[in-house]
Image (spheres, rainbow, N blue to C red):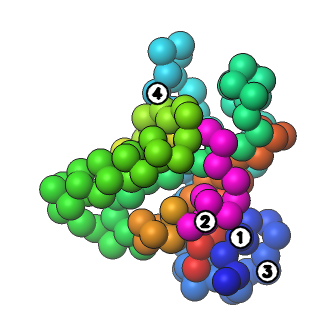
Amino acid sequence: MNYSWFVGDILPGNSEIPSEKISAYLATEYTVFDENPDFILRVGEPSAVMKSYFEAYGEVSALFITAFNPQGQEQSDIENKASHKSLGHELQDSSRLVLEGAGSDPTGSWPSEKSYLAFGMGTEISAQIGQRFQQDAVLWVGADAVPRLMLLR
């Protein structure tokens, strides 16, 4: 299955996701709630905080994902909360460190979506979980601590 496409590695039009949606995902601020100050991940920008987490926990990858609004189709609060809870259970079973977060539109045009940051998640499992929760894309961070948008359809 052809799912591990990162924005920048593909030509425009090779995804089923409309370019406007991809642009919105690229502009999103992916906030991680931490005991230290919260931190924001941005696509393509190295994160010193992620690098320090990788060093502290001996990890080399992480997945930032939501279960809200599959394929960008608005769901009820009840459906979103149930999906979020289910995703949380799955990530807890797959990762030794999971932090809460939220993806937010910096312009405020759409509401933030509860999310998780799960460490130790390679591209294959990240794509599988994203597809299982019917997401257009997920944010994946490799050993270089640079978040990348992984398109899933």
Name the side, left or right, on which 52 lies relative to 152: right
What residue type is disc 3 on? Leu
What residue type is disc 1 on? Ser
Q: Does 76 lie within the magenta span? A: no
Q: Residue 4 carries which label?
A: 1
Nearest to N terminus: mark 4 or mark 2: 4
Q: Which mark is residue 11?
A: 3
Q: How crowded is mark 1: few (under 14 residues within 10 Å), some or many (20 or more)?
A: some
The answer to whether mark 1 and mark 2 are in CB contact below 8 A is: yes
Q: Which of 76 and 111 is in front in this view?
A: 76
The answer to whether mark 1 and mark 3 are in CB contact below 8 A is: no
Nearest to N terminus: mark 1 or mark 2: 1
How far apart marks 4 and 2 lie (CA) works out to 23 Å
How far apart marks 1 and 2 lie (CA) works out to 7 Å
The answer to whether mark 4 and mark 1 are in CB contact below 8 A is: no
What residue is at 59 percent from the left and 73 percent from the top?
Answer: 152
What residue is at 34 percent from the left and 64 percent from the top?
Answer: 69
Residue beneath label 4, please? 33
- Image quadrant where one finds the N terminus: bottom right
In the image, which residues are magenta? Answer: 118-128
Q: Can residue 110 be seen in this view?
A: no
Residue beneath label 2, please? 127
The nearer-to-camera label among 1 and 3 is 1
Q: Residues within 10 Å of mark 3 (few under 14, many from 20)?
A: few
How far apart marks 3 and 4 lie (CA) works out to 34 Å
User: As displayed, is residue 119 above or below residue 136?
Assistant: above
How many numbered tags mark residues here?
Answer: 4
Nearest to N terminus: mark 3 or mark 4: 3
